[in-house]
Image: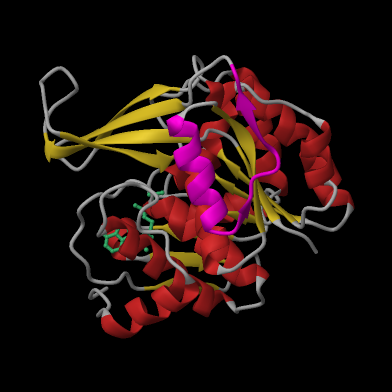
């Protein structure tokens, strides 16, 4: 029906290599790596072998070229990525705390990452898209909200599907407008991909079963819950449920796992694979990605995932 499209921040990411308590202490850092949750998602779609295209912006600089080169290499259509002559490519810094949580410093609003809008290229892409994936992090940008709100009815009108990953980041402010668009997407998405507490936050209810029920009754077509090192579960409105065990790996850098998981799941389903097989690929994509430093560095081809699945034990449930 047409490519999977994703809208939002394209960044370079600098990653701390030690565990600490904030950004105030000097620390060893590595990077820049191509990044931005929507960009990681779409890179995994392309790498898996699905038609994929990105909407966003980079600066006319090396950081922008790092991203464009990577996305192109992995088969992503970059024709609707704007190259801004005046602003630098966006960046993110990530640091890990001893309790497993993360802190980000984002340079998005003051960079090229937020400087895109509804252009002829974007409209042309929306008119041939088969699937729109929305990352909650992108909803912090008014520019992305406008593009998503305009693309949504166009993709829908031609029979395309929609997925939503809440991807909540405490560092990215989500105002009332973002909340409204999020609620619209929640009630009409074909697939919701929350992780951890995002399920209950999205539903506004406590308890996994109750939250799943509330969201499916509210119009969401399918829910795939990401459970980190505990795997994932898919819930359908008919009450059916498919659970997948995680793969047993040593976690080096968790950033990007959920984006790779989503890219593999959406693409596998769009290529016609059943839920169970798509979940296995998604868990493999997430697990493989955490073994590699850099958020997009572990994005894998289908053949790489087949090899990973054959070679890696499943974690006990
Ligand atoms: P997010 O990155 O969105 O917070 P998760 O941390 O749940 O999402 O990771 C997404 C998926 O990646 C998980 O459902 C799981 O399949 C896989 N994954 C993530 N972390 C690990 C890990 N430490 N070991 C094995 N699989 C993992």
> Where ligand 1 lies, by image quadrant?
bottom left
Instruction: Give the image location of residue 154, x and y in percent.
Output: 85, 44
Which image quadrant: the C terminus? bottom left
Does any portion of residue 205 appear in the rendered image?
Answer: no
Does any portion of residue 90 appear in the rendered image?
Answer: yes
Residues in magenta? 62-85
- In the image, taking residue 249 as reference, residue 195 lies left or right, namely right
* 72 part of magenta stretch: yes
Instruction: Give the image location of residue 97, x and y in percent.
Output: 16, 35
Q: Is residue 52 above or below residue 113?
A: below
Residue at horizontal 10 percent and vertical 22 percent from the top = 26
- The answer to which quarter of the image holds residue 227 is bottom left
Residue at horizontal 19 percent and vertical 43 percent from the top = 100
Residue at horizontal 84 percent and vertical 33 percent from the top = 120
- In the image, taking residue 246 as reference, residue 223 lies left or right, namely right
* 61 part of magenta stretch: no
Q: Between residues 224 and 314, which one lies in front from this camera angle?
A: 314
Residue at horizontal 70 percent and vertical 39 percent from the top = 80
Q: Is residue 203 above or below residue 291?
A: above
Which image quadrant: the N terminus? bottom right
Farthest residue, direction right: 157
- In the image, taking residue 281 as reference, residue 252 lies left or right, namely left
Instruction: Give the image location of residue 257, x and y in percent.
Output: 37, 54
Farthest residue, direction bottom: 310
Instruction: Give the image location of residue 193, x and y in percent.
Output: 52, 53
Total numbered labels placed on residues in the image:
0
- In the image, taking residue 105 as reference, residue 124 lies left or right, namely right
Q: Between residues 125 and 83, which one lies in front from this camera angle?
A: 83
């Amino acid at each position: 029906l047409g490519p999977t499209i994703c809208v939002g921040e394209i960044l370079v990411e600098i990653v701390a290599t030690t565990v600490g308590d904030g950004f105030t202490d000097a620390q060893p850092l590595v990077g820049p790596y191509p990044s931005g949750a929507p960009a990681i998602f779409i890179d995994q779609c392309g790498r898996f072998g699905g038609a994929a295209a990105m909407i966003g912006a980079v600066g006319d600089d090396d950081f922008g070229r790092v991203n464009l080169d990577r996305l192109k290499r992995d088969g992503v259509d970059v024709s609707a990525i704007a190259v801004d002559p005046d602003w630098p490519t966006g960046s993110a810094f990530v640091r890990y705390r001893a309790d497993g949580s993360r802190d980000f410093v984002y340079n998005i609003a003051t960079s090229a990452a937020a400087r895109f809008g509804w252009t002829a290229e974007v409209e042309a892409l929306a008119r041939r898209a088969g699937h729109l994936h929305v990352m909650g992090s992108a909803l912090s940008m008014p520019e992305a909200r406008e593009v998503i709100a305009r693309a949504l009815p166009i993709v829908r009108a031609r029979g395309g599907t929609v997925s939503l990953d809440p991807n909540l980041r405490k560092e990215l402010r989500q105002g009332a407008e973002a909340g409204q668009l999020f609620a619209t997407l929640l009630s009409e998405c074909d697939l919701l991909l929350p992780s951890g507490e995002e399920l209950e936050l999205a539903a506004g209810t406590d308890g996994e079963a109750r939250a799943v029920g509330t969201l499916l009754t509210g119009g969401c077509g399918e829910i795939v819950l990401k459970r980190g090192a505990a795997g994932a579960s898919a819930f359908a409105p008919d009450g059916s449920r498919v659970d997948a065990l995680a793969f047993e790996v040593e976690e080096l850098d968790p950033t990007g796992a959920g984006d790779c998981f989503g890219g593999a799941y959406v693409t596998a389903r769009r290529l016609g694979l059943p839920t169970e097989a798509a979940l296995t690929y998604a868990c493999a994509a997430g697990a493989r990605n955490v073994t590699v430093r850099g958020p997009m560095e572990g994005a894998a081809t289908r053949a790489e995932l087949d090899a990973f699945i054959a070679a890696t034990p499943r974690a006990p449930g």
